[in-house]
Image: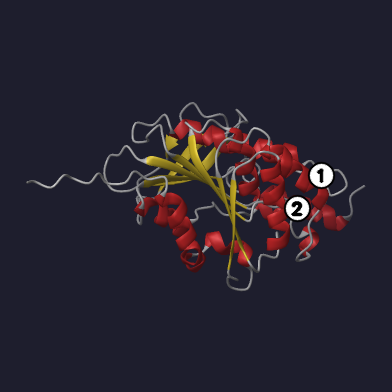
């Protein structure tokens, strides 16, 4: 029988946790565009037919068509914290991408915040952690939202970029086996699962299992991955992140691994803040510059 403390926590959770969105006959924008970057609330499909993912879409001026960037957010195994999670937006990162001509979708995956529903990507506890399952489910969630947006008339069918943070980055790695015609590049900030179990810095839940899963994601990986981690990341420190990247590469994946200087007090959140995105801007510019079409030089008149 649950303790009084547990019972009260469950009552609080029930009060805070929004009901999962019922199956929607119509997805798409919900409300007017705002500033900056034409920010607009959307509902997009998820792998759970009973749950519509809440999302924010950012766009450059004009009608497009624009290349698409999808940002996959971090997660937590803590049920209460997931229930209270605000809508992920990654506005500084979205601003950088919009400036480079991308429409940017930030979907909130099932089991989080306003989207609600079942936490499909659950990795389980340390003793029986299933990181392959959690990664592949997250990849499916990312791909479902991406596929829907690619059907919109203002989105180009080529040149899609996936940007993943932490657990979202882990799902992006699992998505690397996608057809390069659909996804041009994947950028991950400190990809992984199981970092800081019980809030203990520099500890990782079942690290050997995580390494094995990274190697499995490398099998058949076709999309190139740029892997960024701050020197002071307390969830997936650079030495371990490098091992993950090496395992992914050994499995067959294409990965460019870069360690950035320390950022703020905890480098894991580098991709979420304005200063953090500035911190990573040189690397982001390097990756994106290689994807965008270069202007054609006009021949000089004689």
Q: Earlier in the sequence, mark 1 or mark 2?
A: 1
Where residue 37 sits in the image (x, y, percent)? 35, 53
Which residue is the extreme one toward the bottom?
Answer: 265
- Mark 1 → mark 2, Cα distance in angstroms: 9 Å
Q: Which residue is mark 2?
A: 194
The residue sitting at 51% across, 33% down in the picture is 180
How crowded is the residue under tag 1: few (<14 C-alpha within 10 Å), some, or many (20+)? some
Q: Are dots 1 and 2 in contact, CB under 8 Å? A: yes
Where residue 73 sits in the image (x, y, percent)? 58, 50
The residue sitting at 49% across, 68% down in the picture is 275
Q: Tell me which corner region of the image, top left, top right, bottom left or bottom right, holds residue 257.
A: bottom right
The residue sitting at 72% across, 54% down in the picture is 243
Q: Label 1's element?
A: loop
Using residue 250 as the reference point, say whether residue 140 is left or right of it: left
Using residue 77 as the reference point, say whether residue 21 is left or right of it: left
Q: Which residue is mark 1?
A: 129
| In-front residue for pair 74/115 | 74
Q: Label 2's element?
A: loop
Which residue is the extreme one toward the front?
Answer: 302
In this orientation, does residue 119 appear?
Answer: no
In this orientation, does residue 191 appear?
Answer: yes
Which residue is the extreme one toward the right?
Answer: 1
How crowded is the residue under tag 2: few (<14 C-alpha within 10 Å), some, or many (20+)? many
Where residue 190 sits in the image (x, y, percent)? 63, 56
Number of numbered tags placed on the structure image: 2
């Amino acid at each position: 029988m649950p303790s009084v403390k547990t019972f009260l926590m469950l009552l609080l959770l029930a009060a805070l946790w929004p009901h999962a969105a019922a199956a929607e006959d119509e997805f798409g924008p919900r409300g007017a565009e705002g500033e900056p970057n034409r920010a607009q609330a959307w509902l997009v499909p998820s792998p759970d037919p009973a749950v519509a993912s809440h999302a924010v879409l950012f766009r450059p001026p004009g009608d497009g068509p624009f290349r698409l960037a999808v940002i996959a957010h971090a997660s937590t195994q803590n049920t209460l914290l997931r229930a209270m999670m605000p809508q992920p937006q990654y506005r500084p990162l979205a601003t950088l991408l919009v400036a480079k001509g991308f429409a940017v979708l930030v979907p909130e995956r099932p089991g989080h915040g306003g989207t609600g529903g079942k936490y499909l990507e659950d990795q389980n506890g340390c003793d029986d952690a299933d990181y392959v399952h959690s990664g592949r489910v997250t990849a499916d969630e990312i791909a479902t939202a991406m596929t829907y947006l690619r059907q919109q008339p203002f989105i180009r069918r080529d040149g899609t970029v996936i940007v993943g943070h932490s657990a979202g980055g882990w799902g992006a790695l699992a998505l690397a086996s996608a057809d390069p015609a659909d996804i041009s590049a994947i950028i991950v900030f400190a990809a992984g699962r199981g970092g800081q179990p019980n809030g203990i810095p520099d500890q990782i839940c079942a690290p050997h299992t995580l390494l094995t899963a990274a190697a499995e994601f490398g099998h058949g990986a076709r999309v190139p991955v740029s892997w960024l981690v701050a020197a002071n990341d307390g969830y997936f420190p650079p030495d371990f992140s490098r091992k993950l990247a090496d395992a992914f590469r050994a499995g067959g994946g294409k990965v460019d691994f870069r360690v950035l200087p320390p950022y703020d007090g905890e480098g894991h959140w580098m991709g979420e803040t304005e200063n953090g995105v500035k911190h990573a801007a040189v690397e982001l510019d390097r990756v994106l510059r290689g994807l965008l079409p270069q202007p054609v030089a006009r021949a000089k008149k004689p």
